[in-house]
């Protein structure tokens, strides 16, 4: 995906980031300075409609990512999530080439690939290879589209980084609708999907339609990726899908609680990222991914330290007995 | 060297393949492309077989992104880009070797790391753009990452060939223990093989392969060559030695075929390679499925005769 980023950036005359920055400086954005009175800072930010929209859209995406992400981690689909995001970008590039809305290219490519991956790799073992092969080909198509496309690629660029500071009320409503549909589908599939994810074979023996669930979840994942791309970009959705759920899974074994933790963490990372990016003009995804990864490392370190503390008296006891 | 300039000088395709190839090889850039492409195809085919066998596709994909962040980071910090590239990828590869042994835990850990590395890559990029930094570095990045296999100088091609030879030699030296550890890690560990160390060393080899490819032909081309040949070989041949050879041969065939097609058709070589690889994989799956169905039907028709022969004897 990153090679594609580079190509787009060299094709945009001033570079998309500069364009975005100038754009939101022109839209009456004051030179921001943090006062360290967080409530006051928040009030300052929320005076702007585009900041309100950013926080709301970020919240919707974070909740969806937390719920879907728990199953991504549980089912070992991190690679699939990453691949779908990359593939979505190739689709968006194709749509830009054809002059249609990138979201159509995104949906066609992600859903098509989700079905393709599901068909090619039936067993968990084979799925990894199927994902790799579909991903490699989609990226190849992306290269072809980009080599054919010579225009200004800001639309495709927005797909990559998202335009969280440029979300209109209409975008917000579309995101909300998509989020509600995805969450409703997850609510319907929740129990059988959980069963199938924990124990594939027993679930199948009990008559749970495992193959159907697997395919349905891949399509939900494709929708979640496409939904989030408009708001937070291809890069970010992956971080929000995997990392909060990975932390949650380490903290608790109970599914309901883990999903709640994943949602809260995704929300916290997103809002904190938006908050920081108001003052420091780098892409939101930089802050969100760094916050998420930092938390993940911290949690693993704390858990490892605790495990050692718990183990030490045991070892002493064993030593005394020996 | 833009395509339009090339087209005006290029000889037309003549359906006489020998003649076409000789025409093609008159150009220095095609000689370089062929040398680098051949070396990388062999490395990718051999390493790729193990990547597929060990189910480390996601790790390889992540390493290629790490390599990219390494190049950009080195450029931002003003250190040598090759040092940043090989240093960071090798370091992360060693770290990945130490990650969880269970497949799912590893998957999650790699994913988490990858998400951050992507963020880091964006950060380095935006440092450039915000600072109005040297755009030629970015252009250079594009050229190398995207697979300008047709734009290599002879010395670059030679360097790639040398690095590739190094990786191949290291892989051959480790061949037997690595195969054992990949096919049956538990028995190998019980026999006293350092399975985890082998895993780390193998990932470092993947990292070097990624590094060489980034300098020369791009992540994308490498990833197609890494996955499809190994996967096809594994489906067709059970014996590891033969599968390794087949994997390297397929990678070579894809590369040579795409270079030839790319020379005459004016499509990006990496697109052609990824398409050849994808089509071959799907064709393999389909033919195996058809064969299986045919075999299932055949015994059903033969069963009465088989039964009659046994009863006769």
Image (cartoon, coloured by chain):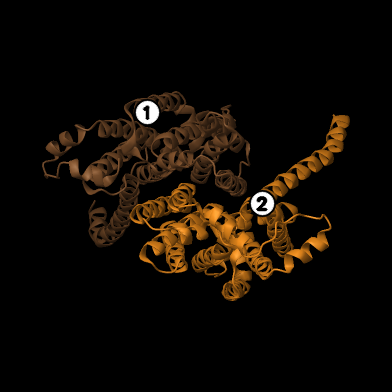
Chain colours: A orange, B brown
Q: In x, y percent, where is residue B33? A: 30, 34
Q: Which residue is mark 1?
A: B156
Q: Residue at x 66, y 54 (%)?
A: A288
Residue that mark 2 sits on: A287
| Label annotation for residue A214 | none
Q: Quadrant of the C terminus of chain A?
A: top right
Dot 2: element? helix
Question: Under tag 1, what secondary structure?
Answer: helix
Asked if residue B82 is positioned above or below residue A72 in the image, the reply reads above
Separation (CA) of disc 1 from disc 2: 37 Å
Q: Is residue A320 above or below residue A288?
A: above
Would you say A31 lies left or right of B179 here?
A: right
x%, y% of residue A261? 73, 60
Q: Chain of mark 1?
A: B
- Please tell me how crowded label 2 is: few (under 14), some (14-19), or many (20+) other residues with Cα within 10 Å: many
- What chain is tagged by disc 2? A
Q: Nearer the viewer, residue A289 or A298?
A: A289
Q: Is residue B142 left or right of residue B157?
A: right
Q: Nearer the viewer, residue A198 or A206?
A: A198
Q: Are marks 1 and 2 in contact (CB under 8 Å)?
A: no
Q: Position of residue A126 (x, y in %)?
A: 45, 52
| Foreground of the two, A322 or A72 | A72
Instruction: Name the residue: 63% across, 70% down.
Output: A191
Q: Position of residue A307 (x, y in %)?
A: 79, 42
Determine which quarter of the picture holds residue B173.
top left
| A195 on left or right of B269 | right
Closer to us: B78 or A61: B78
Which residue occupies 26% across, 34% down?
A: B30
Residue A217 in view here: yes
Residue A122: in sight, yes or no?
no
The answer to whether marks 1 and 2 sit on the same chain is: no
């Amino acid at each position: 995906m990153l090679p594609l980023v580079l190509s787009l950036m060299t094709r945009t005359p001033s570079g998309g980031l500069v364009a975005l920055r100038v754009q939101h400086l022109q839209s009456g954005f004051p030179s921001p300075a943090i006062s360290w009175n967080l409530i006051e800072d928040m009030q300052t930010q929320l005076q702007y409609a585009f900041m309100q929209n950013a926080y709301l859209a970020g919240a919707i995406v974070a909740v969806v990512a937390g719920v879907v992400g728990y199953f991504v981690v549980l089912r070992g689909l991190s690679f699939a999530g990453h691949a779908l995001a990359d593939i979505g970008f190739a689709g968006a590039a194709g749509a830009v080439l054809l002059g249609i809305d990138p979201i159509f290219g995104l949906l066609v490519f992600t859903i098509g690939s989700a079905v393709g991956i599901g068909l090619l790799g039936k067993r968990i073992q084979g799925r990894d290879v199927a994902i790799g092969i579909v991903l490699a080909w989609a990226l190849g198509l992306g290269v072809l589209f980009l080599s054919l496309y010579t225009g200004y690629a800001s639309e495709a660029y927005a797909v990559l980084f998202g335009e969280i500071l440029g979300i209109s009320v209409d975008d917000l409503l579309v995101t909300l609708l998509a989020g509600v549909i995805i969450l409703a589908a997850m609510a319907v599939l929740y129990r059988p999907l959980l069963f199938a994810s924990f124990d594939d074979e027993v679930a199948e023996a009990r008559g749970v339609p495992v193959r159907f669930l697997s395919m349905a979840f891949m399509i939900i994942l494709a929708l979640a990726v496409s939904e989030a791309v408009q708001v937070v970009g291809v890069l970010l959705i992956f971080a929000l899908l995997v990392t909060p759920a990975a932390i949650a899974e380490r903290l608790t074994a109970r599914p309901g609680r883990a999903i709640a933790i994943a949602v809260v963490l995704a929300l916290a990372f997103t809002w904190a990222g938006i908050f920081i990016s108001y003052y420091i003009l780098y892409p939101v995804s930089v802050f969100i991914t760094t916050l998420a990864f930092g938390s993940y490392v911290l949690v693993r370190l704390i858990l490892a330290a605790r495990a050692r503390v718990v183990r030490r008296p045991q070892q002493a006891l064993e030593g005394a007995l020996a | 060297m833009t395509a339009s300039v090339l087209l005006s000088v290029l000889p037309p395709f003549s359906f006489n393949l020998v003649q076409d190839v000789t025409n093609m090889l008159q150009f220095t850039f095609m000689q370089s492309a062929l040398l680098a492409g051949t070396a990388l195809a062999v490395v990718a085919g051999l390493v790729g077989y193990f990547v597929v066998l060990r189910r480390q596709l996601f790790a390889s994909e992540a390493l290629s992104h790490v390599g990219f962040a390494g190049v950009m980071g080195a450029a931002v910090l003003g250190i040598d880009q090759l040092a940043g590239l090989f240093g960071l990828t090798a370091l992360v590869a060693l770290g990945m070797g130490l990650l969880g042994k269970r497949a799912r835990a590893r998957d999650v850990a790699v994913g988490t790391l990858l998400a951050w590395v992507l963020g880091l890559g964006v950060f380095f990029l935006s440092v450039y753009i915000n600072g109005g930094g040297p755009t030629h570095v970015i252009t250079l990045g594009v050229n190398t990452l995207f697979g300008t296999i047709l734009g290599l100088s002879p010395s670059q091609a030679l360097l790639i060939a040398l690095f590739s030879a190094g990786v191949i030699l290291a892989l051959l030296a480790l061949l037997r223990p690595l195969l054992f550890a990949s096919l049956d890690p538990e028995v190998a560990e019980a026999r006293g093989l350092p399975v985890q160390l082998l895993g780390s060393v193998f990932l470092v080899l993947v990292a070097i392969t990624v590094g060489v490819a980034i300098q020369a032909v791009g992540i994308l081309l490498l990833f197609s060559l890494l996955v499809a040949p190994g996967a096809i070989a594994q489906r067709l041949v059970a014996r590891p030695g033969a599968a390794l050879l087949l994997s390297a041969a397929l990678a070579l065939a894809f590369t040579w075929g795409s270079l030839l097609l790319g020379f005459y058709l004016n499509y990006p070589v990496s697109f052609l390679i990824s398409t050849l690889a994808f089509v071959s994989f799907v064709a393999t799956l389909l033919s195996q499925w058809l064969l299986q169905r045919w075999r299932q039907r055949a015994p059903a028709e033969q069963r009465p005769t088989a039964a009659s022969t046994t009863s006769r004897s």
